[in-house]
Amino acid sequence: MKIALNILLIAFLLVGCESITPKPKVNIYLKNEVDSSKSNIIALPSMIMSDDYQLGAREYSNSLADGLFAKNWSDAIAEGKVIPVPKAALDQLPDAYTGLGKLLASMDAVSAIEQTTELSGLLEAVGSKFGDGAFAFALYDKEESQYKSSKSLKLTLGLFDVKKMTWAWITKAQFESPKVGPAIPYEVASQQLMEASFEELYAQKTLKK
């Protein structure tokens, strides 16, 4: 209920903020030969990732973004189901972040990646607890205090096909808060990035409602 109320509050804030901030620019990188449209979606919790694909602080938590991420995915798939993974549950999986770090480091890879021991352990742990499905990521480059200082925030979305061991698609979006005055709230910036990314995925017909 609290998350639902927060989402409603941010919707009101967005109406005011959209008139003073430009729409985030979104770029999409996709592999047309990878079709994950009928896969279940394992919606992982939001994480921090640097520009060089390094996993950031494991303490980062953004339950509001996680709820929006799962909702957007639920609206985006006609077959299969969306399985949200709470951060607390992910934290309990042994060496999960080690495997995720290896996976994210492959984001700029052109071909499928080799299934290392760390990745095998990650896939088995997630599969046994949550079921099979493509891994969906929402990766911010800054936590709130860093964003307030820079007034800039990036979001990378990615869908990893665990059967073909390759990325089906990746989006990169950037939000710039006005340089004059206080930064637009972090929650609003992260929401605008999320919505703009999914809108572009629909526009490019990468996803279909």
Image (tube, rainbow, N blue to C red):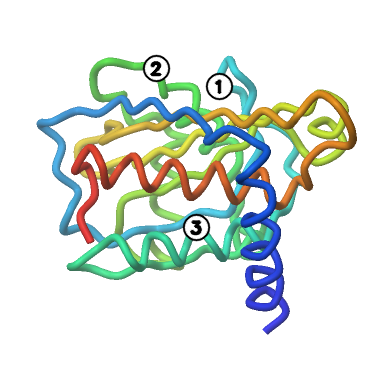
Residue name at image x 47 percent, y 28 percent: 25
The residue at which mark 2 appears reads as 108
Give residue 69's position: percent from left, percent from top.
Answer: 50, 57
**Quarter of the image where the C terminus is located:** bottom left
Rounded to the nearest angstrom, the CA distance separating label 2 from label 3 is: 23 Å
Q: Is residue 91 left or right of residue 124?
A: right
Mark 1 vs 3: CB contact within 8 A: no
Q: Which residue is mark 1?
A: 53
Q: Nearer the viewer, mark 1 or mark 3?
A: 3
Q: Closer to the camera, 147 or 139?
A: 147
Distance from the alpha carbon under mark 2 to that under mark 1: 8 Å
Query: Would you call the spot at circle 2 few (<14 residues within 10 Å), some (14-19), or many (20 or more)?
Result: few
Q: What residue did someone put label 3 on? A: 69
Left or right, 115 with respect to 185, comes to left
Mark pair 1, 3: CA separation? 20 Å
- Would you say the residues marked 2 and 1 are in contact, meaning their CB atoms lie under 8 Å apart? yes
Counting other residues with Cα less than 10 Å from the Cα at mark 1, is it few (<14), some (14-19), or many (20 or more)? some
